[in-house]
Amino acid sequence: MEPELFFFQDIDKLNKAVITSLMLFAYETVSETGRFSIALSGGKTPLSLYSMMAQDNVKNNFPYFNTYFFWGDERFVPNNHSENNFKRAKEIFLSKTNIPEENIFPVFPLYKKNIPIEQYAQEYEKKIKNFFAETLDDKSADTPLFDVTLLGIGTDGHTASLFPNDKALCETDKLVVPALAPPEYTVRERITVTLPLINRSRRVYFIVSGNEKQKIVDTIINDPEQAERVYPAARVTAKERLMWYLHNIKI
């Protein structure tokens, strides 16, 4: 799929463009199906976007009551940990809106360290499958699942928690699996959605900020065959639109 590129020098303008696109798509989808599903990105890059999504002019107009929130990945830490993706999104965004609690699907509703990470991954996959049960019943791998998946990209080319050379990147069947970040990461144990799930999204929005990611993005866009051998993010596609929102990056 040919990626669509959107360039911004101002992060607020980028965020506004993403929200405008999401809002229009959400209304369109809710009018057709009655609900809108989105997998949120972790990390620091989307935090300013989430903050803007809690502003009055957005939350008073976005169909949040019909929107269902999942996560693309999560660090294997308690929900009150500073690096927990759900905690960050809840504090900045979710707790400041009228989103029903039953519309929010954190990876760890109740974190217990004595429960194996594999079990948490299986339980999250089960939640996703239950949510999309009717869609999955047709057994078609071409049928979209999430309406939107938001993604970032790391300086090693990882996305979600799909890291170079980790076995999670090679998963071809399961929708959610444990993952292991490289040693330089503060929290190595993760749970991540897999490429088979990401690539069944109707739309994927990559939000990338920082010129240190310039080379990675340039390779993914201009030399996709080489990029797929090196960068996990290069293996991402979508059913309808693959969109790259780039801040301080030139191609």
Image (cartoon, rainbow, N blue to C red):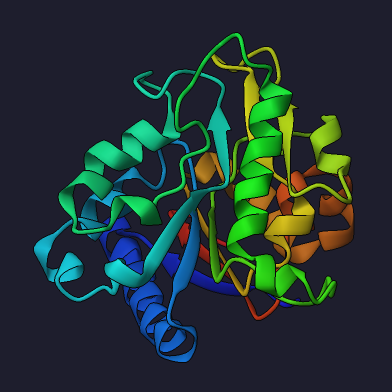
Q: Find residue 137 and report its image quarter.
A: bottom right
At 32% from the left and 54% from the top, the residue drawn is 49
In this picture, residue 221 sits left or right of residue 56: right
Number of callouts in the render? 0
At 30% from the left and 59% from the top, the residue drawn is 10
In this picture, residue 88 sits left or right of residue 234: left
Q: Position of residue 122 (x, y in %)?
A: 71, 37
Q: Position of residue 222 (x, y in %)?
A: 76, 65
The C terminus appears in which quarter of the rendering? bottom right
In the picture as drawn, the residue positioned furthest to the top comes out as 114
Nearer-the-camera pick, 232 or 139:
139
In the picture as drawn, the residue positioned furthest to the left comes out as 56
At 29% from the left and 74% from the top, the residue drawn is 63
Nearer-the-camera pick, 48 or 240:
240
Q: Find residue 45 and report its image quarter.
A: top left
At 49% from the left and 47% from the top, the residue drawn is 41
Residue 218 visible to the viewer: yes
Residue 215 visible to the viewer: no
34 above or below 132?
A: below
Q: Find residue 86 and report its image quarter.
A: top left
The N terminus appears in which quarter of the rendering? bottom right
Q: Position of residue 182 (x, y in %)?
A: 71, 19
90 above or below 54?
A: above
132 above or below 234?
A: below
Nearer-the-camera pick, 93 or 243:
93
